[in-house]
Image (spheres, grey):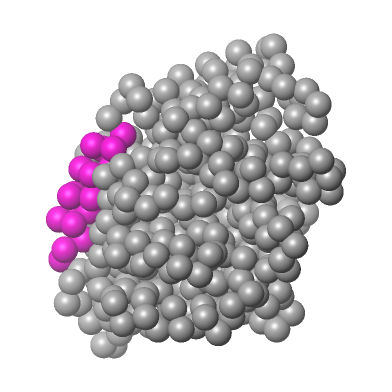
Amino acid sequence: MNDLPDWYTSGRNHVWLPYTQMQTVRPPLPVVSAQGTRLRLADGRELVDGISSWWACVHGYRHPHIEEAVQRQLQTLPHVMLGGLAHEQAYVLARRLAALLPGDLNHVFFSDSGSVAVEVAMKMAGQFWLNRGQRRVKFLCFRGGYHGDTFATMSVCDPDEGMHSLFKGALLEQVVVDLPRDAAGEAALGEVIARHKGELAGIVVEPLVQGAGGMVFHDSFTLQALRRLADEHDLLLIFDEIFVGLGRLGDAMFACQIADVQPDILTLSKALTGGTLPLAATIASTRIHDGFLSDDPMHALMHGPTYMGNAMGCAAANASLDLFEQEPRLAQARHIGVRLEQLLAPLRGLAGVKEVRVRGAIGVVQLDRPAPADQLSAACIERGVWLRPFRDILYTTPPLTIGEEDLEQVGRAMVSTIRNWSESLAS
């Protein structure tokens, strides 16, 4: 990269990058602006963002409706604590989320990141039982799962294949099992739960798609089985919809609606603000909320991030929900899925390609060995597309607003990159 900006060269040695070995990392690309589905680099190149900045920018970059809402809020009330005070944007957003979600998921606790939202869900579930005089603080979680990077959420991620395996044995002890995919799997899981009777507070799962654990899909049966088992053994069911929630799958706004299963607690983040500001929500049923009502002050949920319910973040989220109401996001997600099936089909059967799978606006090329991530990413960049492969997959989760030309460019980049890599295996 030539003609690097001063801010980049002077600050590069001081920024510790995420999920990155700093000794061997390729220099990150300096982005100077973004618009729609495109990132503009300091050297003038443009890249189609094929992963929506970690799945968050569902409406693309700089949607004017969200920008205007945030600017208006900045000029009136940028932030105020929710401890003892209230503001319009948070209260409106909580009401709207409750109206969108099924059943009595009516009680919204705000935070500022997905990891914290899941951490709050786990704390909420554990304290629900503590308030009833039962010490049940372990969780049933699943191989291939990923729920965040904070200490408690690391403990419910895949302990062997996930990115937190280094901490195995040092985290909170959980019960890790395979997802039940048929009646036999459901029965086997029931036996596991029975062996841990009295220990488990709940079940934590990413519904329909396990995201950062490998983009692994499962069907509605799995979630219906988990609901049955949770009811049978009196466990709380937590859906982590931070990846799939808010339209990514195309068939409904939330995975729980597609599966026709209501969890006891559900988490949202990422797409909640359309990728503009950090905001997350942990949403509980009335039963869970009422389990904290008491004359005893220690029965309250003792959690309160400083920036929870940030007014500008809530304004962005309300504007994002406006766009889901006013523009055809679910239809766009379904169309992306149809086109990705067509665009990625040539990769099926290639040497080194184990599977190509698509669900909604998620396209995944599963390799049969660990991916040379830097090599594959660099090849996509050469083709004008920003993708970030990991482990043994190259995937795309584009903005739901992506145009046909940009979507085809993403597909062509993936096909060309994997074809070249596949051919290199024989040499």
Q: Is residue 252 visible?
A: yes
In this picture, residue 390 sits left or right of residue 324: right
- 296 over 13 or under it: above or below: above
In the rendered image, residue 155 lying in the magenta stretch gets the answer no
Residue, far bottom: 427
Q: x, y (%) of residue 35?
A: 44, 31
All told, the count of numbered labels is: 0
In this picture, residue 423 sits left or right of residue 21: left
In the rendered image, residue 336 lying in the magenta stretch gets the answer yes
Q: x, y (%) of residue 314?
A: 59, 28
Task: Judge by depth and name the residue closer to the eye, 187 or 174.
Answer: 187
The residue drawn where x is 53% and y is 65% is 234
Residue stretch in magenta: 329-346
Q: Quadrant of the C terminus?
A: bottom left
Q: Is residue 116 visible?
A: no
In terms of secondary structure, what is the magenta stretch mainly?
Answer: helix
The residue drawn where x is 37% and y is 62% is 223
Task: Judge by depth and name the residue closer to the eye, 238 or 373.
Answer: 238
Q: Quadrant of residue 345?
A: bottom left
Q: x, y (%) of residue 414?
A: 29, 60
Q: x, y (%) of residue 88?
A: 63, 18
Task: Judge by depth and name the residue closer to the eye, 284 or 130.
Answer: 130
- 297 over 380 or under it: above or below: above
- 284 over 307 or under it: above or below: below
The residue drawn where x is 48% and y is 27% is 96
The residue drawn where x is 15% and y is 66% is 346
Q: Quadrant of residue 21?
A: bottom right
